Image: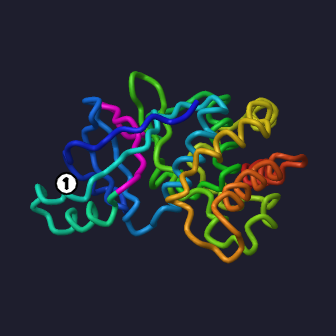
Amino acid sequence: MPLRTVNVTRYVTPLREGGSLPAIVEGDDDGLYVLKFRGAGQGPKALIAELVAGELARAAGLPIPEIVFAQLEGDLARTEPDAEIQDLIRASGGLNLALDYLPGSVTFDPLVDHPDAALASAIVWFDALVSNVDRSARNANMLTWHRRLWLIDHGAALYFHHNWSTGLQRSDAPFPMIKDHVLLRQAAALREADALMSARLPPEVIERITQLIPDAWLQEDENFTDAAAQREAYFRYFVQRLRSPHHFVEEALRAQHL
């Protein structure tokens, strides 16, 4: 299914714990969203990572807040007294990305929250697949809401797309940083997760997700003739990565014994 598009009608408050200064905003559907700004320091690649990783996780059965495209008007900056926020809004005019705001959610605490082996294994598998460097004990990027664990903040994933000259060549590479994953020790069913999650991400699902990437977020790159070719590269990367053997799974299994 295509993503919904909402128009941002009000800037509510910044979330200053995020490095890219995301914010809670209100949409024209009266909903509240966590907005990720295209004009933030990480640029549109962070939005692509958020979109692709988030929708891959959803397709694989993991709990992800709804992701929407968010149309932002630069004129909204006029009502904001903070000069940094004004600059960020003006730099992000146009199409951005937002996630459904989960009111009353609490940050995952590894000392208190203990997901079962199946869920922990599925999350570790997914983060190894998308090369997510940002699920450590220091910054788990998970929330508990209505007694359920939710995954957020995948802008640091897909780091292969920061260098497309070698990106596709690294599609079958392991992910050594999985050793720092906050749920690694609880992921006692990685082999089972591998079989289950892989089956949920056939090429047609990956193609549907990568086709969601807007042209406006695909920056010019000498490795591609146009936006369609660049979008195709994301598709090929994940299709190749999900071909056996899965070195990223073997690396996670090895890391459990370090």
Q: Residue at x 84, y 49 (%)?
A: 246
Residue 93 showing in the rendered view: yes
Looking at the rendered structure, the kind of residue marked 1 is Leu
Q: Up-down: is 84 above or below 133?
A: below
For the record, the magenta segment spans 94-108
The reply to whether the magenta stretch includes residue 168 is: no
- The number of callouts visible is 1
User: Would you call the spot at circle 1 few (<14 residues within 10 Å), some (14-19), or many (20 or more)?
Assistant: some
Magenta: main secondary structure: strand
- Farthest bottom residue? 222
186 relative to 217 in the view: left or right: right
Task: Assign the N terminus to one quadrant of the image.
Answer: top right
Please provide percent x and percent y for residue 71: 35, 47
| Local secondary structure at mark 1 | helix
Q: Residue at x 72, y 43 (%)?
A: 207
Q: Residue at x 56, y 54 (%)?
A: 49
Please provide percent x and percent y for residue 219: 55, 68
Q: Please identify the quarter of the rendering in which residue 43 is found.
A: bottom left
Q: Up-down: is 208 above or below 252?
A: above
- Farthest top residue? 146
Q: Please identify the quarter of the rendering in which residue 57 is found.
A: top right
Please provide percent x and percent y for residue 23: 28, 50
Please provide percent x and percent y for residue 250: 82, 50
149 relative to 6 in the view: left or right: right
Instruction: Write down the residue under mark 1.
Output: 76
The reply to whether the magenta stretch includes residue 96 is: yes
Residue 189 showing in the rendered view: no
Q: Residue at x 11, y 55 (%)?
A: 79
Q: Nearer the viewer, residue 52 or 174?
A: 52
